[in-house]
Image (tube, helix red, strand yellow):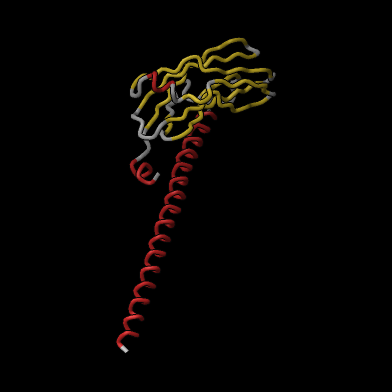
Amino acid sequence: MKRGTRKGAVEMSMGTIVVIVLAVSMLILGMIFVRSIMCSGIVMSEEISENVQNEIRGLFGANEFGVSCMGEGGEEVKIADGGRRKIICVIKTDEGGEYTIRVKEIKSLKGTPTADVNKWVLVNEWKGSVGVGEKTVDPLILNIPKNTQATTLRIIFEESGPGGVKTHASTIDVAHMGAFTAAIC
């Protein structure tokens, strides 16, 4: 009879080990799932907040025709590090026509050196036709690495359109994500 109880004890301990391994595996997968959902939610809320602020700023110049880019005209614009970030321009016209907006120069005023900032550039030009009304375009897309130091960028855009060639200067601040976001993402 002693042998039967020992066999039962061994089977019970093997079953317990299997349950513990499965429980730990499910816990780890659950933590990864929750982390990815929270990270995407935090980044999305930061982008929505930034876009709402930019739209409110844009309402003050709603009656002006022409091209207006983010960070132009003294408005303070901050973008986060750690991903692709679009620098947008708004074209508002009453005639329509073909437009080209290209990045003429990107210069780092402080923080990351200009040579490193130029490596962030994925897209540096937009070409297309614009009808009567307003169109939002993204002539510059940056892929900013995580944990980038605070950097101030001076971006010179060159606009070619029905009104001729014009230059626009934007100042953009690149800020490191918050500690909470960085810890989760």
Q: Quadrant of the C terminus?
A: top left
Which residue is most to the left? 2
Towards the viewer: 25 or 94: 25
Taking the spot 48% from the left edge, 38% from the top edge, the residue there is 47
Taking the spot 40% from the left edge, 27% from the top edge, the residue there is 173
Q: Is residue 12 above or below residue 167?
A: below
Q: Left or right of 166: which side holds 131?
A: right
Towards the viewer: 84 or 57: 84
Q: Is residue 158 above or below residue 11?
A: above
Image quadrant in which you'd find residue 116? top left
Q: Is residue 15 above or below residue 103?
A: below
Q: Quadrant of the N terminus?
A: bottom left
Total labels: the figure holds 0
The image shows residue 134 at horizontal and vertical percentages of 63, 26
The image shows residue 68 at horizontal and vertical percentages of 54, 22
Towards the viewer: 183 or 19: 19
The image shows residue 127 at horizontal and vertical percentages of 62, 20
Taking the spot 59% from the left edge, 22% from the top edge, the residue there is 126
